[in-house]
Amino acid sequence: MATTTPAGVRGGGRSGTTPDGAPMTHPQIMKALSGLMLGMFVAILSSTIVSNALPQIISDLGGTQSSYTWVVTAALLSMTAATPLWGKLSDLFSKKLLVQISLVVYVLGSVVAGMSQNTGMLIACRVVQGIGVGGLSALAQIVMAAMISPRERGRYSGYLGAVFAVATVGGPLLGGVITDTDWLGWRWCFYVGVPFAVIALIVLQKTLRLPVVRRDVKVDWLGAFLISGAVSLLLIWVTQAGDSYDWISWTTLAMTGGAVVLGLLFLLVESRASDPIIPLRLFRNKTISLASAASLFVGIAMFSGTVFFSQYFQLARGESPTMSGILTIPMIGGLFVSSTVSGQVITKTGRWKAWLVAGGVLLTAGLGLLGSLRYDTPYWHIAVYMALTGLGLGMMMQNLVLATQNQVAPQDLGAASSVVTFFRSLGGAMGVSALGAVMANRVTHYVTDGLTALGPKAAAMAHGGGGGIPDLDKLPAPLRTVIESAYGHGVGDVFLYAAPCALLALLLVLFIKEVALKSKPTSHAPAAASAVQEAPAVARAK
């Protein structure tokens, strides 16, 4: 072995082992994972805390619906582009250090974002945030896989899913309260996570022990540049098409053609690289290929739910940012329950496919029903639809990564894990971009129709709105109803377009062959393979 592992604590669990061969107990694993989960909590909290504040933020900064979409898309774009690089770096360098670096990057982006004076500055800061959260998203699964067997990992993936759910529901609630508090304001949505991040860094330093194996291998920077360029061009095109230029135009041809060329160059470079950022041989495995494709469509469903609900509740139903967070609890509750329960049952049975199939069915049904949303839809209907969507997401998100990790060699663990995360992020970015463009178009259409129905004087208003986010409290009653109806119907259309994506994810999952989960952690590999993998994480007793 090329590693030197620090002393650990003996125990009697089944998942990981201490350096002297003694298995780690559940408390020891939880201690080792505590800082990692806290870091994930901070990143997700910082992401979701702005969701209910965004309508107010964009209004204060003088932005438009396009700006609203770009504030979300910018973070998703950089997160997507950075994820494969973080995954490959984790196969070469200290996973612990990379987690800490990604957390620092994310926090720095958040602090500067709070100082934004215009939407352009805010979008730039969101790019920095996305780079950090891309690392945290990819590395959390990678670190867990290095110390816990696939059979036991379902249990701990459920815990990560629970952290995701708590931060996802806590973020919008906290963000709503901060935005509604006059002496704080929305800028504190970016500052509030800093103390938690400092605590996470301290806990990570004390609890996560990951000895470093140094490999004399160059990072595939050219591959990283090409995949980042291809993804960025594609997402910029999707976001701007239909607004800045026509869907069928020379600009469209240039951007899509450029993305295709960069993509082909990426494949060429990866096929010849000695240590590619995304090993193309991974896709010879049917499970990895299908799981990656399914993750793409799950990403569309996941991010469409978290991004557009805040607009629905605030602009279609006139709720405050705080209430917007409270009203989304059914979806987050469903995600929390299903991710935790499915993880526990998978650990006991070693079987995971049934959960993926059930999740696909529930996700498709939930999004399809949400497609019927209108501004006056009874809330209990919406709550049921959101719960179904959350249950489906919880069953699919972590388990697609788990199925992939179960079938790769130790030296490819980081790359394989990040590939699935990459496609989920790519789907989310593409989904938010395309669905945001759809929503802007449909809302404009419904507003024009509504004003026309009110008469000539009201119809004249349709040509002077400027595309900004409206302030409902300043609108007269008839016009307010038109705006609420337009946003209600527009968000419903977004979910209706997202539902077929969930159906495609379900169809892909059906073709994945179930392989019983392994009972040994990834680091328990033959010496030839484990020489290039970090040893299991160990928690040191204090």
Image (spheres, rainbow, N blue to C red):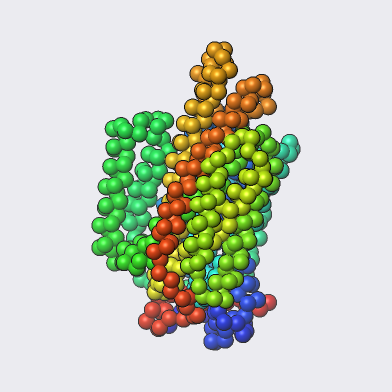
Q: Does 59 sit above or below residue 269?
A: above
Q: Of residues 476 and 153, which is closer to you in this image?
A: 476
| Residue 393 visible | no
Seen at 53% across and 42% down, the residue is 371
- Quadrant into which the C terminus falls: bottom right
Task: Name the image quarter holding residue 23.
Answer: bottom right
Residue 291 is situated, as x and y percent measured from the top left of the image, at 42, 62
Residue 335 is situated, as x and y percent measured from the top left of the image, at 60, 57
Residue 400 is situated, as x and y percent measured from the top left of the image, at 47, 63
Left or right position of 340 against 131:
right
Q: Of residues 49 and 497, which is closer to you in this image?
A: 497
Q: Of residues 179 and 218, which is closer to you in this image?
A: 179
Left or right position of 297 against 30:
left
Left or right position of 125 against 224:
right
| Residue 485 visible | yes
Residue 397 is situated, as x and y percent measured from the top left of the image, at 51, 59
Seen at 52% across and 59% down, the residue is 359
Residue, far top: 456
The count of marks equals 0
Seen at 35% across and 34% down, the residue is 247
- Quadrant into which the N terminus falls: bottom left
Task: Name the image quarter holding residue 114.
Answer: top right
Seen at 56% across and 52% down, the residue is 389
